[in-house]
Image (spheres, coloured by chain):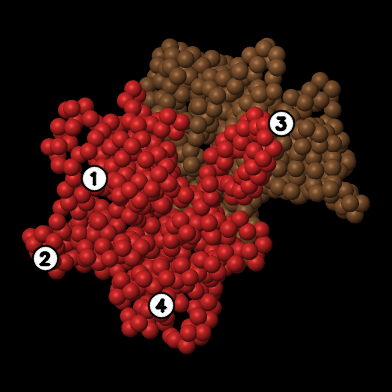
Chain colours: A red, B brown
Amino acid sequence: MHPQFDQKTKKEAKEAGKLFATGLNVSPGAAYGMVALDADLAETWAKEEGKPVIMVRPETKPDDVHGMLAANGILTCRGGRTSHAALVARQFGKPAVVGVSEMKIDLNSRQIMVGDEIIIEGAVISIDGTAGEVYEGKLPTSVPDIKDQWLMKLLSWADEYRKLEVWANADYPSDAKRALSYGAQGLGLCRSEHMFFEANRIPIFQKMIMADLRIDRREALEALLPFQREDYAELFRVMKGLPVIIRLIDPPLHEFLPNHIDLLRDLADLKVKINHAKQMSEIDDLLKQIKEKEHVLKRVESLREENPMLGLRGVRLGILIPELTKMQVRAAFEAACIVTREGVKVTPKIMIPLTSHVNELKKQRELLEEEASAVMKEQNMEIAYKFGTMIELPRAALTADQIAEYSSFVSFGTNDLTQTTYGISRDDAESGFLIEYLESGILSENPFATIDPFGVGELMKIAITKGRKVKPDLECGICGEHGGDPKSIALCHKLGLNYVSCSPFRVPVARLAAAHAALEDGGI
Amino acid sequence: MHPQFDQKTKKEAKEAGKLFATGLNVSPGAAYGMVALDADLAETWAKEEGKPVIMVRPETKPDDVHGMLAANGILTCRGGRTSHAALVARQFGKPAVVGVSEMKIDLNSRQIMVGDEIIIEGAVISIDGTAGEVYEGKLPTSVPDIKDQWLMKLLSWADEYRKLEVWANADYPSDAKRALSYGAQGLGLCRSEHMFFEANRIPIFQKMIMADLRIDRREALEALLPFQREDYAELFRVMKGLPVIIRLIDPPLHEFLPNHIDLLRDLADLKVKINHAKQMSEIDDLLKQIKEKEHVLKRVESLREENPMLGLRGVRLGILIPELTKMQVRAAFEAACIVTREGVKVTPKIMIPLTSHVNELKKQRELLEEEASAVMKEQNMEIAYKFGTMIELPRAALTADQIAEYSSFVSFGTNDLTQTTYGISRDDAESGFLIEYLESGILSENPFATIDPFGVGELMKIAITKGRKVKPDLECGICGEHGGDPKSIALCHKLGLNYVSCSPFRVPVARLAAAHAALEDGGI
């Protein structure tokens, strides 16, 4: 359902030696544009000058998001399928190729290189996010028509047969609209923290992280509340009463701050510069910069973890910083009240990420109930709501009976569940040993693309069985990327899930795959 | 069974304001000595001058091991229960306190500080690794007597009742001897890579890692072979025919190289220095140093991973660098031949770490069989051996039926299994949110100290059931640190394990705990 390059055009370009590089195909679709090596330039060229842009970076960070949003496509040297670049790209439906390790970026001469091939900033390239290819020059794109009558007919037939509902993962109203137009029946995952990454909010969120005093932290959170409330309200309006699952903040806090190594390098550069500086004003300025960087560095180092994937993130943040959970809950309930008054029925579903022990849920649920009651009392309104959790750690799956006592729904986060079940860090492995494993046949399929039935599939089965034993109507869904993969959808059908949730672009395919699974199951 | 401080003496010291700091009690026992802030100094003072030394470092790295071996105790500012310092300390039975985050080390003025309290290098401190305490000055120590007749009697009674065998984790002949004297019935874990950390070997191993060409790598491995062979032979001699499980290399390769951040800081310092350098010879020397550091940095950066715990380690190394597995297997079989000729029966057991998929085992087993046959043919001798794997990832537990087809034994690595099942990085958590979790009652016990029965315990049960269904005589053991914890030993008894393996010092307690579990089970 994404814009595509014509196969014939690609073949010709390859024959003409225009294939510049290949990498990981992390976000499907095709795009062309001028190479821009930083986010500000990408934004200027695209927004002010109306030019098509491909943003090219060694890797991306939250500070780059405004450039990524402005660009038509994203290209990076480092990162895997769950890298920041890949997640943001998929989220916004931007074609992206990441992990092009052979590509070097020279920020002094403003050019990118693969071996002897050089492309200077401003030159046009084309990227194929479906195939993971980068071409020199402009290749024309075409968009398949979702309004195609035959396709619409086929999808409506499919809907008659399938048992699984198809929901979508969307963080922004525009994504939610697209998802609805493709037939999504709900939002299975709204990553509430993605809203913090936007240009006007990230400085406030950084202030929250840098706060030494509780009062400063509360001030920053209060400043974020109106943004978050309006984002939720708009999502509720778009979804017109369909289910919306809001997942509370998940990523480790250091992801919102500058990169540790970059800070160290910048500081080292500044210290060399100050040695050469002659004028007093220059020295003063450099000293000020050094002081600021050192302040940030200190916090970055205090947040530094050996294995952030297994560190302070998810519900652990909500336990350690209860004010953060409270702010997010308040925003959701205030938004629900606003939209209910506008005449739209809203039933917010609040989802806790990375639960490993039922006691985490108990604590967060108490907090939620208290804050929700406070809002409803202030607003003089009753809002029905649901409380649930992700199952993305083996222990959560193994103790789903305990968890079901405190959850009315669970959603399998199969990306993380695959990482912990297999003991594989996706970002590291997909540009490393996983390639060797797939090539040598140790693994027949990439477990991050298709659910491994013996590991993750087995844990899902255990969880569903244990959970529904305690609560027969426990709603079970999946919001990992596997939710859009046909083979994985077949497994989800077999396991008796209620829905799959995937990125908006994959919704039509998921509808077909769900019908296919139901038909196979029925022996047709 | 470790040297201890008298409770009364400690109380007096506390009352006299001599308690300097507290940290994590990662390796039990008591020790005193002069503060030495680097490994070379620690070694010089201890070995050449015969003085008692406590080595104090921000954290330890392989380069520090010679100093740690020479010291009576170890004290660090950073790190958790599975940090390098903690592992080495336990391994050598050195008392250690780590993660003393309030302590600062000033290498310029050569002193350590906690708040306003300052202790200069060379001054005497006492550390209590059992309690995690650091005192100023010398506190006298005493050693409990294992030869105590009453204790011996008690242990021999215990041995009559217990069903579980008690083995020990030991990498060096001296540890193995101690384990035997405490009643160990085998070695459940010999971490073959620990031998590479010694001062005369680490440069060769680093050469292996830095090698760009296969021939250089092979050369380095050939240089390591005689060391490894002699280490194994000596272990076999000490253990006199009792089982010895050799685990092939496990840690990520970057652990053998200098720290990334340290390299960056050193390079930055060198670059500032070169700005101030005046003499040509000094500049040349600095340039040479910079070049060398940059070369190492390049490799360190290419090995860098976001989450090394879930990265390129364990069997993944053996798959990507088959020469490494071959060298280790050859060393083990050559050693077995030598010791067999000396008249000691040897049945080497080779264990593969971090298996997640049965195909990894198949591949490594083929390699092993080929190399083992080659050695036996060369030596004109038949050596009986066993092949097995660790179960330290959830997927290995869930697919134990597949794994049992290629393993004659499995050993639960419950440290790592706890990390992936819970999604908790131990190093990060134990000085972070885990403390809050324990204090607020979300967790009633530290899952790294006592096996969590609902998560890891459940996976062990699944693995044993599935594995023995395929292979009823599958030998099942545990070699995580839980193997020395009485509550966990009771669970191991209930699950029907064949043995628990723990650090030598914990063997007597494990014998008692195993008997206790058997007696409880029998309803006595």
Do marks 4 and 3 both belong to one polypeptide chain? Answer: no
**Residue name at image x 35 percent, y 82 percent:** A342
Which secondary structure, mark 1?
strand
Near-viewer residue (A471 or A145)? A145
Q: Between disc 1 and disc 4, whose residue precedes?
A: 1
Which secondary structure, mark 4?
helix
Extreme-bottom residue of the structure: A380
Q: Between disc 1 and disc 2, whose residue precedes?
A: 1
User: Residue B374 at what x, y percent from top left?
Assistant: 40, 16
Which amino acid, by three-letter code, is at mark 4? Ala
**Residue name at image x 61 percent, y 48 percent:** A296
- Chain containing mark 3: B
Residue to which mark 2 is pinned? A157
Residue to which mark 3 is pinned? B68
Which amino acid, by three-letter code, is at mark 2? Trp
Instruction: Tell me the tag on residue A336.
Output: 4
| Residue depth check, mark 3 versus mark 2: number of the one nearer the observer | 2
**Does residue A326 appear anywhere in the picture?**
yes
Q: Between disc 2 and disc 4, whose residue precedes?
A: 2
Disc 4 and disc 3: Cα gap in Å?
A: 61 Å
| Residue depth check, mark 1 versus mark 2: number of the one nearer the observer | 1
Quarter containing the N terminus of chain B: top right
- Chain containing mark 2: A
Near-viewer residue (A80 or A361)? A80
- Chain containing mark 1: A
Instruction: Tell me the tag on residue A30.
Output: 1
Q: How busy is the neighbourhood of tag 1: few (under 14 within 10 Å), some, or many (20 plus)? A: many
Disc 3 and disc 2: Cα gap in Å?
A: 71 Å
